[in-house]
Amino acid sequence: MIPLDFKKASGLITTVIQDATTKQVLMVAYMNAESLEKTMTTGETWFWSRSRNMLWHKGETSGNTQTVQAIAVDCDADTLLITVNPAGPACHTGHTSCFYRQYTERKGTQ
């Protein structure tokens, strides 16, 4: 197993969640060693909530769980890409993906 560099980012690893079927990026969250272990053990995604300072199981209250299909690690061992089969929307707004809005920058404005 590839050792992950949790120290690089104060104990948290950036984690990209992607739909295993559509390949759409669903969300980005953070994992610590404990949430990764729970993900590996249960087969569903667990994350570290930076705002609540606690572990959270995706779908615990909404029912929109994510069943893990594969976990890939980047070349620097500080980011994960997890492909999942989602049981509903990933975004708390009800959208399939948290990336449902387009960003457009206006040139010449600050």
Image (tube, rainbow, N blue to C red):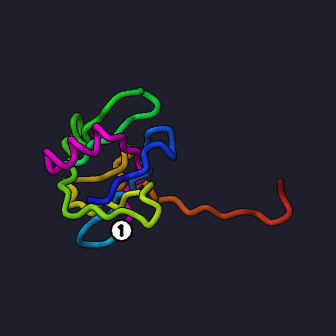
Q: Nearer the viewer, residue 50 or 85?
A: 50
Q: Percent from the top left, x then y, of residue 52?
A: 41, 27
Which residue extends farthest right? 108
Q: Percent from the top left, x then y, of residue 3?
A: 34, 54
Q: Name the residue that disc number 1 marks.
A: 24
Vertical placement of 51 versus 67: above or below? above
- Under circle 1, the secondary element is loop
Vertical placement of 16 versus 22: above or below? above
Q: Is residue 11 magenta?
A: no
Number of numbered tags placed on the structure image: 1
Q: Amino acid at mark 1?
A: Gln
Q: Nearer the viewer, residue 101 or 21?
A: 21
- Seen at 50% across and 38% down, the residue is 10
Vertical placement of 45 versus 54: above or below? below
Q: Is residue 39 magenta?
A: yes
- Seen at 32% across and 41% down, the residue is 33
Quadrant for residue 41, please give it.
top left
User: Mark 1, residues whose alpha carbon is within 10 Å: few (<14), some, or many (≥20)?
Assistant: some
- Seen at 21% across and 41% down, the residue is 38
Judge left or right: residue 16 versus residue 46: right
Q: Quarter holding the N terminus?
A: bottom left
Residue bounds of the magenta highlight = 24-43
Q: Percent from the top left, x then y, of residue 83?
A: 27, 63
- Seen at 52% across and 59% down, the residue is 101
